[in-house]
Image (cartoon, rainbow, N blue to C red):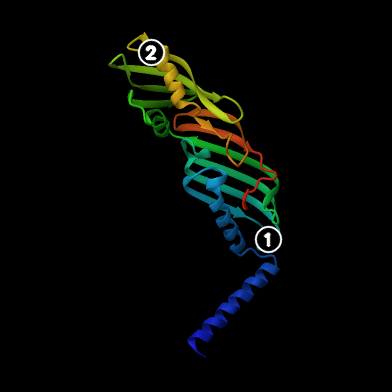
Amino acid sequence: MTTSRRRSVWLLGLLLLATALIAAGCNTGVAERAAEGKLRRRLPEIIGPAEQYDVDIRASSDLSVMEGRLRTITIEGRQVRVAHTWPVDHILVVLDRVRVNLEKETLQSVGAARFQVTIYPATLVGYLENDEENLRDAQIHLEEGKLTVTGRYLLMGLWTSFRVSGTLELLDHSRIGFRTRGASAAGLPVPARIVRHLEQRLNPVLDVSDTLLPIELTRVEVRPEGVVVSGIPHLDGTSLLGAR
C-alpha cells in the first residue's frame, strides 16, 4: 500500500470514528471549538474591539451543540473598548442553560446570565490624562467604596496640586460615573471648575448603552485592586453568531 493510500485510509477511519462518536452522543469537542471560533470573531461587533477574547462553550455532546443546546458559554475579554469608548481591563460574560435558534443564529433562551467588568487604577488615570494638557502627575488611589484623585492642574498659569475624593455610582442602568465628595488644594477649597473638569473627563466611566449585547448594570464596587461593575445581559433574540 502506498503512503498516500495509507494516509487516505487513516483519514477516512478518523472521519468514521468521529461520526460514530457524535451519533452515540459523545463529546469530541469539535463542534464546541467550531462554535467558539465563530462567536469569537463576532465579539468585536457585539461588545467592542479588544486586545484578546477567549470563548469557552460547554455542552453534553457534539449532538447537543448541533441542536443548539449548550450548558454554558463563558466569554472573557482583555483591554476591551466597550461600544468603542474607553478601554476596560477585563470583561466576563457567563451564560448558563443556553438554547440557540440555529436557523436564525440567535439566542432563543438563557437560564441565567451575568456580566462583570473590572477597571484598574492605571486605566482610570489614562481616562484622565488622554489628550489633556492642563493635567500632570495624575494618580488614582482606590479604597473600599472610595476613589481619590491627586495631581497638578494648570490654574491661572500655575501648576497647582490638588486632591479630589469621591465615589463611583450608577448614573442609570447603562452608565456609571464619578461623584465628588470632597476636594482640596494645599488646604484650600479646589476651584469648582477643576472639580467639574475632572468629572467631565471621567464620566461616564462606563457606558454600555450602545452595545449590540443588551446589558443592565446593577452594581458598582470600588475595591483597592480595581473598580468592579456587575450587570445582567438581556439576551433573548440577540444575534451572537450571525449578522444583525
Q: Nearer the viewer, residue 147 or 137?
A: 137
Look at the picture and state if 183 lies above or below 117.
above
Q: Which amino acid type is marked by label 2?
A: Ser
The circle on residue 66 is: 1
Residue at left offset 66%, top offset 39%: 234
Determine the CA span between mark 2 and mark 1: 61 Å
The foreground one among 209 and 167 is 209
Quarter of the image for residue 142 reads top left
Give how far across and how far down residue 81 sits, in percent: 48, 40
Identify the image quadrant of residue 147.
Answer: top left
Q: Is residue 188 left or right of residue 75?
A: left
Q: Earlier in the sequence, mark 2 or mark 1?
A: 1
User: Which residue has dot 2 on it?
Assistant: 184
Could you say where residue 172 lies in the image, as x and y percent from the top left? Answer: 60, 26
In the image, taking residue 226 as reference, residue 19 lies left or right, namely right
The outermost residue toward the top is 188
The 10 Å Cα crowd at callout 2, few under 14, some 14 to 19, many 20 or more, is some
Query: Is residue 181 placed above or below 213 in the rendered structure?
Result: above
Q: Position of residue 209 (x, y in %)?
A: 58, 34
Left or right, 19 with respect to 5, comes to: right
